């Protein structure tokens, strides 16, 4: 009898859940349709247009409130419950092309991966700040190079569904043009897979906006070639793909865009690990090192300001590296190329980068931002435009 009651309650729960989720998913599809036809409706029936607009705004506010509640729930439980997982399966079955989020616009690409949609923005002021930053470094005889990491939407073969437009690459082209006009050295990492866009797509996490460790390795190889040409001795071994093994960590799976779809829709985190692991120390400025030992994955790092000492480095160079979150999959390779690495993760960094450089007095400064919308971190450089 107990088993029968359990089955009845289970059926009731599943049925109720579907009655809640399916209408919400179905009607959320009206959004794209409405914005395509609103102008035509306004010409014919202004009153009806106002009613539609009112309910559209009401729906969006409701979605934002639900998103906020889900975020709060995830922060408290740090897990994904069955309802969220069910929602993910429903989105997948219905082949939804847009995923609602309170803070960003997320679309499903033609290869079934999620990506963040970037709006058209003018980053000329941020580019001028980067140029002024380079000029000050040059005056102190500190060499600098900027790396532009690729956004998930490929510059050479975008996979966005019809009706979506992403401006990340256009914004980035304009940004790099200003850097070029001011003689700022840069490497455009979007060109790594210019002739192989399938590899570009494969080396991004399916439900996450970030590149994998494997993509970070290819990006590092581009930088290593540049640094060798500018007098820094970097062993050939650390740019040899055969010198690394692949490790997956399911407990560190990345899913920042698909958090509303549940853990089962995502994929485990991939790391490339050097076969010959150096002895390293990891700490924070002015504090004791909290890790001393051989290279471990994932690297135990402070989220905003981390010091790495590579005891086995073949050179004694000191590098200051600043980045957005794409630096997470990159810093482990850069660590292998020098003796002393200072990493400022600008997402969390609250200090003044120029003052940090004066403290460190590095032999080289390297910066990395994503071709998306992270140029605002230039405001933390401590540079005032004249």
Image (spheres, rainbow, N blue to C red):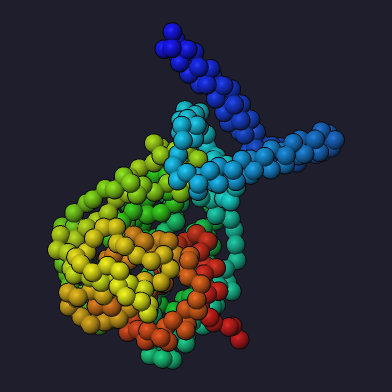
Q: How many marks?
A: 0
Residue 349 place in picture, x, y as percent: 48, 70
Name which residue lies at 55% across and 74% down: 379
Name which residue lies at 60% across and 46% down: 68
User: Residue farthest to the right?
Assistant: 47
Name which residue lies at 43% across and 61% down: 325
231 relative to 55 in the view: left or right? left
- Tell me if residue 99 comes above or below residue 301 in the rendering: above
Residue 186 place in picture, x, y as percent: 40, 73
367 relative to 336 in the view: left or right? right
Which of the two residues, 168 or 384, is positioned nearer the viewer here? 384
Q: Is residue 336 visible?
A: no
Which of the two residues, 292 or 147, is positioned nearer the viewer here? 292
Residue 144 place in picture, x, y as percent: 39, 80
- Tell me if residue 328 comes above or below residue 82 in the rendering: below
Name which residue lies at 47% across and 82% down: 354
User: Residue farthest to the top?
Assistant: 1
């Amino acid at each position: 009898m107990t088993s029968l009651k359990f089955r009845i309650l289970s059926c009731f729960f599943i049925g109720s859940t579907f009655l809640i989720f399916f209408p919400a998913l179905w009607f959320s599809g009206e959004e794209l349709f409405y914005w395509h036809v609103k102008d035509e409706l306004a010409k014919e029936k202004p009153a009806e247009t106002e009613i539609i607009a009112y309910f559209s705004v009401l729906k969006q506010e409701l979605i934002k409130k639900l998103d906020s509640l889900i975020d709060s729930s995830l922060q408290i439980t740090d897990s994904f419950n069955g309802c969220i997982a069910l929602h993910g399966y429903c989105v997948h079955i219905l082949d939804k092309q847009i995923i609602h989020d309170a803070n960003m616009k997320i679309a499903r690409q033609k290869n079934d991966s999620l990506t963040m949609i970037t709006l058209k923005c003018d980053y000329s002021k941020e580019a001028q700040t980067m140029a002024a930053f380079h000029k000050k470094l040059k005056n102190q005889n500190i060499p600098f190079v900027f790396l532009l990491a690729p956004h998930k939407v490929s510059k050479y073969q975008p996979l966005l569904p019809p009706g979506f437009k992403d401006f990340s690459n256009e914004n980035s082209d304009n940004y790099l043009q200003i850097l070029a006009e001011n003689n700022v050295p840069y490497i455009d990492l979007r060109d790594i897979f210019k002739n192989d866009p399938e590899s570009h797509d494969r080396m991004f996490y399916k439900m996450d906006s970030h590149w994998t460790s494997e993509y970070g390795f290819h990006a590092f190889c581009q930088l290593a070639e540049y640094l060798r040409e500018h007098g820094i001795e970097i062993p050939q071994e650390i740019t040899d793909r055969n010198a690394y093994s692949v490790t997956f960590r399911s407990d560190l799976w990345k899913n920042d865009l698909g958090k509303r779809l549940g853990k089962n829709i995502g994929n485990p985190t991939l790391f490339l690990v050097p076969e010959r692991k150096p002895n390293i120390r990891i700490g924070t400025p002015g504090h004791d090192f909290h890790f001393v030992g051989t290279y471990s994955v994932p690297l135990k790092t402070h989220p905003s300001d981390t010091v790495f000492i590579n005891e086995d480095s073949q050179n004694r160079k000191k590098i200051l590296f600043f980045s957005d979150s794409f630096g997470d999959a990159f810093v482990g390779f850069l660590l292998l190329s020098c003796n002393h690495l200072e990493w400022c993760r600008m997402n969390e960094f609250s200090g003044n980068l120029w003052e940090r450089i004066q403290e460190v007095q590095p032999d080289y400064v390297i910066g990395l931002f994503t071709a998306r919308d992270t140029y605002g971190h230039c405001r933390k450089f401590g540079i005032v435009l004249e």
